[in-house]
Image (cartoon, rainbow, N blue to C red):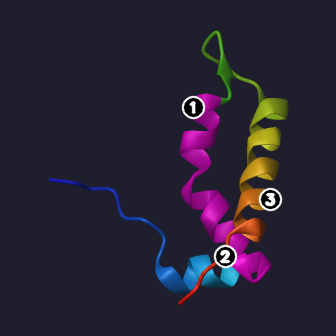
């Protein structure tokens, strides 16, 4: 059984439109993944985690929804 529940479409659409609340919801949703991939020697590198968050925000703002 797949327990992964992606963010709903409205949240994604609002984040693409630069809504800060929606962007925070997206970042909160992916926070565990961000912290996991920001680890170095099993210690979270928070500088790298912030870089990942910044790249995610940039990608969201560039994303085009044709719906």
Q: Helix, strand, or loop for circle 1?
A: helix
Q: Where is residue 8 in the image (x, y as percent from the top left)?
A: 46, 78
The majority secondary structure of the magenta stretch comes to helix
- Residue 43 position, x and y percent, is 67, 18
In this orientation, which residue lies closer to the viewer: 31 or 6? 6
* Of marks 2 and 3, the one in the foreground: 2
Badge 3 crowding class, 10 Å Cα cut-off, few under 14, some 14 to 19, many 20 or more, is few
Q: Residue 23 carries which label?
A: none
Name the residue tied to disc 1. Answer: 36
Residue contact at pointers 1 and 2, CB within 8 angstroms: no
Q: In this view, does 52 lie to the left or right of 47?
A: left
Picture coordinates of residue 1 (x, y %)? Answer: 14, 53
Q: Determine which residue is flagged by label 3.
A: 58
**Which image quadrant for residue 11?**
bottom right
Q: Do the residues labelled 1 and 3 touch (CB within 8 Å)?
A: no
Q: Distance between the residues labelled 2 and 3?
A: 12 Å
Q: What is the secondary structure assignment of the residue under circle 3?
A: helix
Q: Nearer the viewer, mark 1 or mark 2?
A: 2
Specify whether 24 is left or right of 30.
Answer: right
The secondary structure type at the circle numbered 2 is: loop
Q: Which of the 4 image quadrants contains residue 44?
A: top right
Q: Residue furthest left?
A: 1
What x and y, as percent, mark residue 22?
67, 77
Q: Earlier in the sequence, mark 1 or mark 2?
A: 1
Q: Mark 2 points at which residue?
A: 64
Residue 35 located within the stretch drawn in magenta: yes
**Which span of residues is magenta-colored?**
16-37
Question: Residue at horizontal 27%, vertical 56%?
Answer: 3
Using the image, determine if residue 30 lies above or below residue 10.
Answer: above
- Who comes first in sequence, dot 2 or dot 3? 3
């Amino acid at each position: 059984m797949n327990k992964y529940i992606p963010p709903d479409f409205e949240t994604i659409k609002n984040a693409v439109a630069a809504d800060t609340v929606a962007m925070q919801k997206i970042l909160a949703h992916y926070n565990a993944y961000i912290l996991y991939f920001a680890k170095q020697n099993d210690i979270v590198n928070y500088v790298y985690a912030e870089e990942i968050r910044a790249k995610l925000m940039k990608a969201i703002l560039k994303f085009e929804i044709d719906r």
